[in-house]
Image (cartoon, grey):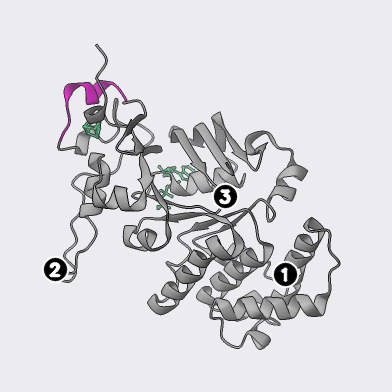
Amino acid sequence: MLLQVEDLHVTYDTVYGTLNALNGVNLSIEEGETVALVGESGSGKSTLGLSIVRLLPPNGRYSKGSIVLNGKNVVSLSGSEVRRMRGTDVFMVFQDPLNTLNPVKRVSTQVLEALAVRAKKENKAFDQREGISEAIEKFKDVRLPDPEVLIHRYPHQLSGGQIQRVVIAIGLLLKPKLFIADEPTSALDVTIQAQVLKLLNSLKSEYKMSVIFITHDISVAYVIADRFAVLYGGEVSEIGEVSKVVKSPLHPYTKALIESIPKRSRKEGELVAIPGSPPNMLSPPTGCKFHPRCPYVMDVCRTENPPYTEADERTLRCWLYERPPT
Ligand code: ATP
Ligand code: SF4
């Protein structure tokens, strides 16, 4: 197992009190597997990604649980161990890539720095000229225009979409064991989105990398993931193989999410919104966090949070699939 997240709790200190962003997340990922984290805004997807790369903001805290990545517990690594882990064990592409690149260094310099890290990891000699040609090839893969010219530019001379593709290309050059992509294509236009998704998809076979793909768009996740982990209120409400989860969702929240995908038969623009709003994580509902919005709610749901249950080859949290406590 490449990644094993167990009973992970993460909180944020806020002026309004402690916000419980992750509440007992369990997630494991095999080598070469792609798992999509899906769920509405605020469900904890980015927090989970940031926790795995140890990049929680200063007000974020690991309050319980463990994250074992490639045999090491990320939560308890020292600063230098974390720096070593990033790029080799894990690489994360953010929704907003602008802060990922250093604004005062040319793209070529930053690419060469990344390649020097990789060469050190592989115990190989490093040739700058070869590094630049390899990077240009990767830039072509992510459909960057004029890669030979672009590589010598500064980040501010590139568009947001180009920077995003440079960052994805650097991630690919590093060949980390786990590639985390947080809404990596939302800033790109539709054609380039499709190309980048195809490229991320090829990671599995070409590089044997595992991928965590964070998105609120199930139709995008469907294209590239092996498994879906559906997040709600900082918990994994259902996790299973993509085809199972999409064709026969079990958890009422997953059902509602799948229903919300625009169907071709529906009139353009006619989206089915999930009734109600996501929980306020400063004062979440008691019991099952989905209960105020759930059409199947029972008395037990209002007071007791369901445990993890196995049903139809997946893991989920819902009293409909578990004998309520007596
Ligand atoms: P989105 O799709 O909008 O990015 P998400 O599913 O990634 O949402 P997170 O960004 O992980 O969700 O947020 C989880 C919860 O933590 C939300 O309630 C959010 O408001 C809160 N949160 C996130 N970052 C911070 C922060 N830096 N300080 C305080 N609360 C935060
Ligand atoms: Fe609905 Fe109850 Fe299941 Fe929660 S536990 S999803 S409220 S049926």
Q: Look at mark 2 in the image and give the residue it sits on.
A: 265
* Residue 87 image point, x, y percent: 68, 56
Left or right side of 325 for 67:
right
In this rendering, is residue 38 above or below 76? below
Name the residue type under label 3.
Glu
State which tag comes first along the sequence, 1 or 3.
Answer: 3
Q: Residue at x 82, y 59 (%)?
A: 120
Contact between labelled residues 3 and 2, with CB atoms less than 8 Å apart? no
Mark 1, ligand 1, within 8 Å: the answer is no
Across and down, in percent, residue 147 comes to 63, 84
Residue matched to label 3:
31
Mark 3 packing: few (<14 Cα in 10 Å), some, or many (20+)?
some
Outermost residue on the right side: it is: 125
Q: Secondary structure at mark 3?
A: loop
In the rendered image, the quadrant that contains the C terminus is top left
Left or right of 225: which side holds 66?
right
Q: Quadrant of residue 261?
A: bottom left
Q: Nearer the viewer, mark 2 or mark 3?
A: 3
- The Cα atoms of the two marked residues, 1 and 3, are separated by 28 Å
Contact? badges 1 and 3 (CB < 8 Å): no
Q: Which residues are magenta?
A: 296-305
Residue at horizontal 37 percent and vertical 42 percent from the top = 239
Tag 1: residue type? Gln
Q: Residue beneath label 1, please? A: 110
| Mark 2 vs 1, N-terminal side | 1
Which is in the foreground here, disc 1 or disc 3? 3
Q: Position of residue 291 (x, y in %)?
A: 23, 33
Relative to 70, is 148 above or below?
below
Tell me if I can see residue 196 in this picture. Answer: yes
Amino acid type shown at disc 2: Ser
